[in-house]
Amino acid sequence: MRMCYDLKILNIAHRGYSGKFDENTMIAFKKAIEYKADGIETDVQLSKDNIPIIIHDETLDRTTNGHGYVKDYTLDELKRFITKSMPKVKALKENALGQLQYSKYNNILKLDEYTVEETRYFQSKNGEEIPTLRELLELVAGSNLKVLNLELKNSIIPYSGLEEKVLSMIYEYSLQDKIIISSFNHLSLVRIRKLDKEIKLGALTDSTLANVPRYLQEISVECYHPFFPSILNKEYMKEIKDAGIIVNPYTVNEEEHMNMVIKANVNSIITNEVERLHNLLKDNRNRF
């Protein structure tokens, strides 16, 4: 099995640059690339007509103006919905829009959190479409991203054929070397490994697993994707890293926590706050 990537800690944009843009949207993915993320993490489900789409929740209500289960709508129907901003992003946008009028008279190109161009974009848009996996793969294929982490959202709804459809599309765009497929449903990872002996896999967990190296070896998975507090024990991490496992914790947003996981010798950090992590990693490299 391939190793995931080199020893440099990678900055992985959680659901795109979701700290400042609507999560799991094309603008969030494009901005992740623009603001120098090394990779993108996102979520894949299936529409009613079996098209792989990008959305985190099994239901539409939290992140869009739609209601009900994603699985009950065709792609055409899903495309009629628009996203809505989460409270933090909504507040940032509203603040920037309030500053926009002032910037017209003072030749300001950067507001508190956004550029004037970005703020004008928000002014012209009332939300974003739900993207398809194909749209994202086309973007990644034309980019210099090192990693695309596709989380299969099949722990609650067992989407039939999701693994095969995702693999087929990855092959179509020849992106195997950039992909990590992850899931909380480890039976899904086992199914993928039977279909593809080389694709990189990541076991997601929200608990502190015992005997991680032995467990991941048994299911032929190279990467461990834990909730970050679970890997802050030095002896625990040493056992995992000594076994050659790639450790990519989620979701690390505060600078204090970023420093903790950097010290823990992780391989990448999955974060909503792309610029914050980029600047911190840059400062650390300059310091040493």
Image (cartoon, grey):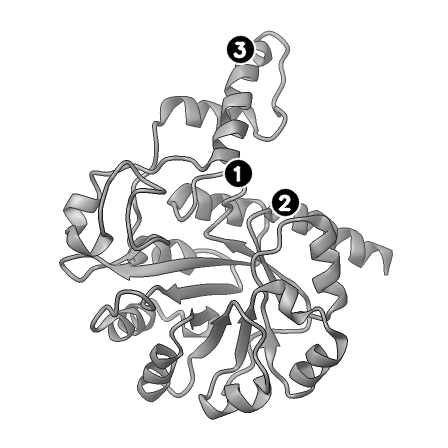
Distance, label 2 to label 3, CA atoms, is: 25 Å
Cβ atoms under marks 2 and 1 closer than 8 Å:
yes
User: What residue do we see at 45% from left, 44% from top?
Assistant: 28
Q: Which SS class for mark 1? A: loop
Cβ atoms under marks 2 and 3 closer than 8 Å:
no
Residue indicated by mark 1: 20
Q: Is residue 267 visible?
A: no
User: What residue do we see at 30% from left, 55% from top?
Assistant: 58
What percent of the width, then of the height, locates residue 218? 47, 92
Please name which of the two marks, 3 or 1, marks the residue nearer to the observer. 1
Which label's residue is closer to the chain start, 3 or 1? 1
> Who is closer to the viewer here, 52 or 103?
52
Residue indicated by mark 2: 275
Which label's residue is closer to the chain start, 2 or 3? 3
Cβ atoms under marks 3 and 1 closer than 8 Å:
no
Residue indicated by mark 3: 101
Q: Which SS class for mark 3? A: helix
> Who is closer to the viewer here, 117 or 275?
275
What percent of the width, then of the height, locates residue 173? 33, 67
